[in-house]
Amino acid sequence: MREFELIDWIRQLPGPSRPDVLTGIGDDAAVLSVPAGFDLIVSTDTSVAGVHFPHGTAAYDVGWKSLAVNLSDLAAMGATPAWVSLALTLPKLDADWLKGFFAGFQALALPHRLALIGGDTTRGPLAITITIHGFCPNGQAVRRRGARAGDALIRIGRLGLAAAGLRWQLARPESERASPLLDPFEQQCLQALNRPEPKIGMDAVLRTHASALIDVSDGLLADLMHVARSSGVGAKVDLDAIEEFGWLSEHFGSSEARDMVTRGGDDYALLAACAPAQVDLLLVAAKALGHAASVIGCFEAEPGCRIHHHGQIDTVGGPSGYEHFT
Ligand SMILES: Nc1ncnc2c1ncn2[C@@H]1O[C@H](COP(=O)(O)OP(=O)(O)OP(=O)(O)O)[C@@H](O)[C@H]1O
Ligand SMILES: Cc1ncc(C[n+]2csc(CCOP(=O)(O)O)c2C)c(N)n1
Ligand SMILES: [Mg+2]
């Protein structure tokens, strides 16, 4: 297969019919029409082999996760996704790998009516960069900066399981990392790492009831700190309210479990600030879509983040999540 054959093959993959794509793959640039009354919401995320996913990860999972992390950023704005562009850097053109990658990519793109509108293909160490575009009714995107003291802190999605999955995955030889794990809890954690479920489909509810939103990519505390700082408030997290902490403690002990839940990252859960009167509406909507959702703390006037655990209060200092270049 050659570069242009690959692009022709990508072009004929099934996609949703979207009248807002005036020109898609095949010209110097895509031509797109933003519906009247909506803001365009845009986000980019790169996934690099050995950095964002272990070497040896199944091609399907690489395709799924590269798109899932981008969908998660749009969910975290209360936006409805519409278009993606895909920049692929590949060490070689391997037809089987590409079929697997696009099967994983399409498994998310098709049900969410996402059109692939263009991209770029180059040779180099395996890396995937996706730019995702979506819409929000004018002025209604949910920002990081709207949390108020007294708001509840809600999580939508599991925390810490992906970090455990990463631990187990990195302990296996590269050649075995594309196969499932036998133990059901280990397999659940591996699934959380490789196939994060973006919290798409509750954008309207989030726009109505969330005062601030973020998705957890770097770690619960790191991303919570972004919301707290942007909003000019502080936050408290009750570790005992996160049931995964108990599950992980059984496997790793409470100190490592706490690190996985609070600093592990790769969760792609949403954190929402929400006025107490609206909490139940948000939780019901999230659970109706099958997501784990609960109140895990609250926002407070005092700046900084505090963790409550067994009646003890710790103030968060130092690195609180994943950082490149450390
Ligand atoms: N190289 C860059 N040039 C311009 N803006 C950037 C660059 N890298 C990041 N940004 C911007 O900085 C802000 C924070 O980026 P970051 O990658 O931390 O996003 P995030 O959504 O918090 O995290 P994640 O990428 O893990 O989902 C975003 O507005 C992003 O667009
Ligand atoms: C092999 C391997 N090593 C480490 C990790 C953990 N990890 C990498 S990037 C990141 C934060 C999100 O990235 P970004 O901030 O670039 O969006 C996390 C938690 C992984 N998934 N795979
Ligand atoms: Mg984000």
Image (spheres, rainbow, N blue to C red):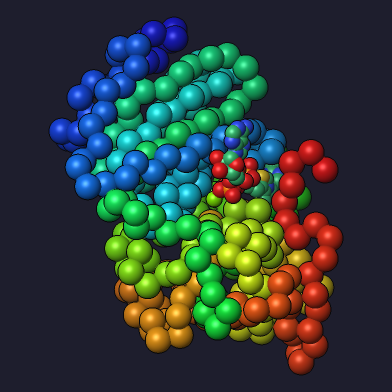
Q: Position of residue 127 (x, y in %)?
A: 59, 28
Which residue is drawn at the image coordinates 53% and 14% (left, top)? Answer: 122
Task: Give 276 or 258, whichever is nearer the viewer.
Answer: 276
Q: Residue furthest bottom?
A: 311
Q: How many marks?
A: 0
Q: Position of residue 92 (x, y in %)?
A: 56, 15
Ligand 1 in which quarter: top right
Q: Is residue 176 above or below residue 121?
A: below
Q: Quadrant of the N terminus?
A: top left
Q: Is residue 197 above or below residue 123?
A: below
Please indicate whether residue 5 sits to the left or right of residue 239 in the image.
left
Q: Is residue 182 above or below residue 6?
A: below
Please indicate, yes or no, whether residue 184 appears anywhere in the rendered image. no
Please indicate whether residue 58 sits to the left or right of residue 38 in the image.
right
Residue 2: name its quadrant.
top left
Which residue is drawn at the image coordinates 19% and 42% (left, top)? Answer: 36
Task: Give 169 or 209, whichever is nearer the viewer.
Answer: 209
Which residue is drawn at the image coordinates 39% and 55% (left, top)? Answer: 141
Q: Position of residue 185 (x, y in %)?
A: 59, 68
Q: Quadrant of the C terminus?
A: top right
Which residue is drawn at the image coordinates 37% and 66% (left, top)? Answer: 206
Q: Is residue 58 above or below residue 92?
A: below
Q: Position of residue 108 (x, y in %)?
A: 36, 45
Residue 210: name its quadrant.
bottom left
Please indicate, yes or no, whether residue 234 appears anywhere in the rendered image. yes
